[in-house]
Amino acid sequence: MADTPIRLGMVGGGSGAFIGAVHRIAARIDGHYDLQAGALSSTPERAMASAEELGLARAYGSYQDMAEAEAAREDGIEAVSIVTPNHAHADAAIAFLERGIHVICDKPLTATMQDAERLAAAAEASDALFVLTHNYTGYPMIRQAREMIARGDLGHLRLVQVEYVQDWMTGEAEGKQAEWRVDPERSGAGGSTGDIGTHAFNLASFVSGLTLQSLAADLDAFVPGRVLDDNAHVMMRFEGGAKGMLWCSQVAPGNENGLRLRIYGDKGGIEWAQEDPNYLWFTPHGEPKRLLTRNGAGATPGNTAFSRTPGGHPEGYLEGFANIYTEAAQAILARRRGEAVPEGLLYPGIADGLAGMRFIDACVRSSRSDAAWTAL
Amino acid sequence: MADTPIRLGMVGGGSGAFIGAVHRIAARIDGHYDLQAGALSSTPERAMASAEELGLARAYGSYQDMAEAEAAREDGIEAVSIVTPNHAHADAAIAFLERGIHVICDKPLTATMQDAERLAAAAEASDALFVLTHNYTGYPMIRQAREMIARGDLGHLRLVQVEYVQDWMTGEAEGKQAEWRVDPERSGAGGSTGDIGTHAFNLASFVSGLTLQSLAADLDAFVPGRVLDDNAHVMMRFEGGAKGMLWCSQVAPGNENGLRLRIYGDKGGIEWAQEDPNYLWFTPHGEPKRLLTRNGAGATPGNTAFSRTPGGHPEGYLEGFANIYTEAAQAILARRRGEAVPEGLLYPGIADGLAGMRFIDACVRSSRSDAAWTAL
Amino acid sequence: MADTPIRLGMVGGGSGAFIGAVHRIAARIDGHYDLQAGALSSTPERAMASAEELGLARAYGSYQDMAEAEAAREDGIEAVSIVTPNHAHADAAIAFLERGIHVICDKPLTATMQDAERLAAAAEASDALFVLTHNYTGYPMIRQAREMIARGDLGHLRLVQVEYVQDWMTGEAEGKQAEWRVDPERSGAGGSTGDIGTHAFNLASFVSGLTLQSLAADLDAFVPGRVLDDNAHVMMRFEGGAKGMLWCSQVAPGNENGLRLRIYGDKGGIEWAQEDPNYLWFTPHGEPKRLLTRNGAGATPGNTAFSRTPGGHPEGYLEGFANIYTEAAQAILARRRGEAVPEGLLYPGIADGLAGMRFIDACVRSSRSDAAWTAL
Amino acid sequence: MADTPIRLGMVGGGSGAFIGAVHRIAARIDGHYDLQAGALSSTPERAMASAEELGLARAYGSYQDMAEAEAAREDGIEAVSIVTPNHAHADAAIAFLERGIHVICDKPLTATMQDAERLAAAAEASDALFVLTHNYTGYPMIRQAREMIARGDLGHLRLVQVEYVQDWMTGEAEGKQAEWRVDPERSGAGGSTGDIGTHAFNLASFVSGLTLQSLAADLDAFVPGRVLDDNAHVMMRFEGGAKGMLWCSQVAPGNENGLRLRIYGDKGGIEWAQEDPNYLWFTPHGEPKRLLTRNGAGATPGNTAFSRTPGGHPEGYLEGFANIYTEAAQAILARRRGEAVPEGLLYPGIADGLAGMRFIDACVRSSRSDAAWTAL
């Protein structure tokens, strides 16, 4: 017998917001959620208008009202997606966690380390689940890469090269998406490091299984007048001796959303690019390169499990995002049934969020010290 | 004020069916449909079990029961998706069309020309809409290609090269997906020509705007004992003088789902590949090649309109499929409101279905006549 | 002890000729030849000027003078490269063959079938060697493809897809390279079929080892006023049951020199593209695709033997061309030493030239009969 | 009237040497050189045997003997190629420079800074020319990239990302090519930094026109027991504010010879990869990406001038190398005629060699100081 969909709310994500719409689609793709309530904007009028536009059953002017009212309903929301700018994550998330409502929160975790720790404490104190949408970990080929490394296909890891390169902030920041990202009040201390560098760091950690020990970072704001970094060069040292480089940039013309990961060990290497996510290159040392595909020949269990279609039917960003929502649903539904959360779910959580915040913080501190090695 | 979702039913698509699951996801992605009823299998027991598994509100043992019962309900389904093997399309579709329920039907239209004509007559006689899911026309870059050709970017068209190449039937056909496709009773007279050749033909026609006049086809069943073609070589002559080639195959190892389209005129050329659908190559004659992207620089209105995310966030097969469902929803909702179907909707319909059937028929006839030129 | 270089002459290839310069570089790359004499143009004045420009030791105003004078010298040329337009191949080649001077001739063999047969008779009657520069057979990855098919890596062959696509004749033919190619007097009955279709046919035959039995061809001259075909669509039937398609075009904008070959059997498939010649895709059926590289992991003997540098140091068109010259040198030097020509040399010869002429002839005849199947 | 070929000698490059054979082919391709004399090995017997194998007119047991003897001959060599391991460059080069014989020397300049300065002094004191074969600067698309940047197509430069990645030293170093490269006595203080890092640094400088101010480097020898670095991560700061990263590695499985360069300014970006050298990606900010090709549409003068064939006929590593030899020949022939060296020749010389040595030295020093910023 099928579970009924999870009753879902949303904070942020009103008209014109990019990531709110993405979360809504991700929640719909596999049919596990029913979006019923929302506090979609920081101004009550726009929040109400956006809710009507989306046809939500219950609209609120603020997340506080929503948290209280929904917690009081028999049929209130079971989970909430938080998709505001970074600085508003912590308070909203805490309000729901304290009321036992599961939280699915966009990244980075918060705008400041203090907020991050406050949120982490609330998450620990709550019975509710906390899910962080480092969505790129949901790609099937990323799951395959992680499984291949875990089972030793690359041997002892030596090198991790990761980059996340965009061009949309090459000129002055314009539009709703850009403006808050260049504002330290709303974005936090990291510009590109917070917005996309954390994704790159998270992905490299997720796939390699390595723990970053220290980094040396050189951050720049190339656009005149910009306060937050729009480019970062980072050298990395991992526990166990592996080394790496991370480059994130939002000012490299010709790059739309170029997240790329390459990992090398003494037995082989892999290469993956987010813009062509259905492929994973794998070279066992001394043998020809293989082009592994989503749900194709040689697929590992995690590749197949997170694929909806046979190989050759490209799945993309939204499906990868949906995979995080679906893993979250498996956990939430288990809780609803009074069961333990199933083993093996890999959705990112509070620990990943804290690690991301420490990464941003270390980048900023290192760069201020002329790229001195800085422990995480 | 948001429209409430369209109440949807489904015929076929029970446990283990590939295309049924695809239709359900496509219907969910943009939130325009609510799947409430189903006759998901040709055997009542399995139909009921599948419906329970999916949590459908109303389950039926046959499409006849469903058509009657739903038509009688105030809150019955407004539209039905038909995702059975080809031979069962016509009767089911007619049952719903006759009751004024909109039909969204998988391709090819039917298994036989007689059925196709019967269904076409029913569609014409009905007030209800008929939508055929030639889903590849829903890709944003395909919309861009069509618009570029229509506005003359390629000049006078000379050449259309299209191919649809797979490898999954290289050996004996095994499994639910393969078995009915090699059975003339259920599949019709075309094997690969019906299953994928029609897609290639439809896509070439959709993008080029050209009308196929005649073809010369050489069909083969390479796997011993196979009755229906698993490979077809086709030369094409279009009205107005353009020429083309079409190759479809299900026995070419190394090709997962290789639908590729290239069109050339006296002013330029374009190239597109389904497995990398977010890209469109465009070369104005004598200038460097451009790599156009989904929702990227140089996007045409149809590209942008059918994109959910910015460039660099790959959208794939399911989103392209969803675009057909969403165009269908725009038409269905207009009807619900008593309005005319909006102009400019390009979802494929009965005429495309008939054209596809004539294509299959012409291929089979031509091949039987040693690849003689055969008018459509 | 190193052999002294082969004394070489050249007919055609004066100032501004493309292919003459290519032959000269190809002859130099491995150091086996010393170009000493030339009749480089059809007009004596330009022939003399071109020879002086190149610093040739002995210049002639006509190939007849050169053949006579060189044959009479103790230290005369041992071999001659013939790089004129097609219609002038036969007489020149025969003049040298009759004098025992080895001939290295550009393709296609001649402009007419009669000339081809006359030349074939002269080649057979002569002790001198005849080498035809179907240069694409010299690429290392092509040698690897041939060896893989010969040893059964693809199993029983079913499909051969080959195309040779250019765009430089999309508009009016202009310049020295274009003008003679559109002139039946100098080019022969085939336009694109003769200029590039023969290359595609030759390459497909060389790699697959299959013999073409019959073809159905649809030829067009898309540019107004053009007499010879600038585009050809060809369906092919090989002995043993394999089928194929061949497309050659010189009017497809966006294609510089797009010779591509794909071959599929019941055990695997390969794909190769001349513009990226250091790669060969190989898929054993049911396994991941491999990207084989020139002199890289998994290289066959023929790949390694025809590589000068390690993998990753791209070799190109000129090196592939040089490989034919070097194989020819191995044969010529063996003859000089009074030895038998070594076994295993694969440079194309008179039989390949005749096959190419029959291919052109069959294309033209088939097309005149509305693409009727025509035996070769 | 054509110039007679330059009489060339060679030091090093005996049997089994990779780079010696490359230099010989590069010298032959355009016909400007005639290799007449050699001291091809450090042991006289092997030197003589190698010379006989190559059919050299004059063989010597040591470079000293060769320098003296050739300088004394009327028809002695005019130029010499030095292709020994690094530690032997300086003494050999000085011996010929002191005798007025032009030197074409492989990179890096020498094994030590002292030798580099000694050689630089000798080069300055000599009338003879000194050419350093940073061959990658000879690629036509690299010339185009340099010209595009110089004319402002990218605007003000911000970012330079360069990497040179191989995998052939992933395991223990074996064979003639590997052994001396891991030996500080013969290779110098840099391992991968000297062997390939200098190429990457040179190429980035050549194309961007930027001057490197300081760097922070983290060098590793991943293979147990290896003394010299086999991997280096480098952050770079250029005069004028541009930043960059350089990665060189010889232990990254799946990379044959992966030299890649990406440069971004406030108006556009370019990307180039050595393994696919006939392409250059160019994106004017806000417009679609263009794929520029060797001698294709949009070619700059330097692209065309260094191309031997039309676009689509791939030229590779050997042709790029030959372009350096051909530029050197233009200078040498000018000198022979008593003319000034023509303007606009861009072959690398002693200044580039010194810059490369300073780069290696800075990398080693920075790494020993825990990646502290180190001025060049």
Image (spheres, coloured by chain):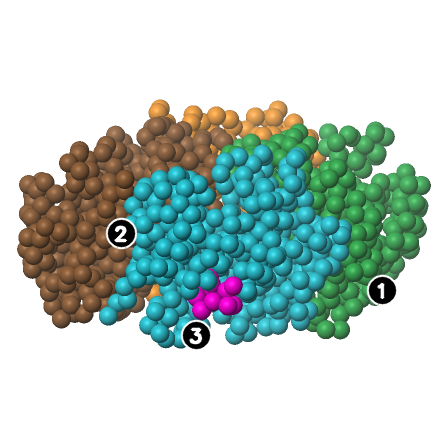
Chain colours: A green, B orange, C brown, D cyan
| Chain of residue at mark 1 | A
Where disc 1 sits, the SS reads helix
Q: Is residue D126 magenta?
A: yes
Which amino acid, mark 1? Glu
Q: Is residue D12 above or below residue B60?
A: below
Quarter location, residue A76: top right
Local packing at callout 2 (Cα closer than 10 Å; few below 14, some 14-19, many 20+) is many
Pointer 2 residue = C27
Q: Mark 1 or mark 2: which is in front?
A: 2
Pointer 1 residue = A185
Which residue sits at x=79%, y=60%?
A: A370
Question: Which range of residues does the magenta coloring cover?
Answer: D122-131
Do tag 3 and tag 1 residues touch (Cβ < 8 Å)? no
- Determine the CA span between mark 1 and mark 2: 69 Å
Which residue sits at x=46%, y=39%?
A: C296
- Determine the CA span between mark 2 and mark 3: 31 Å
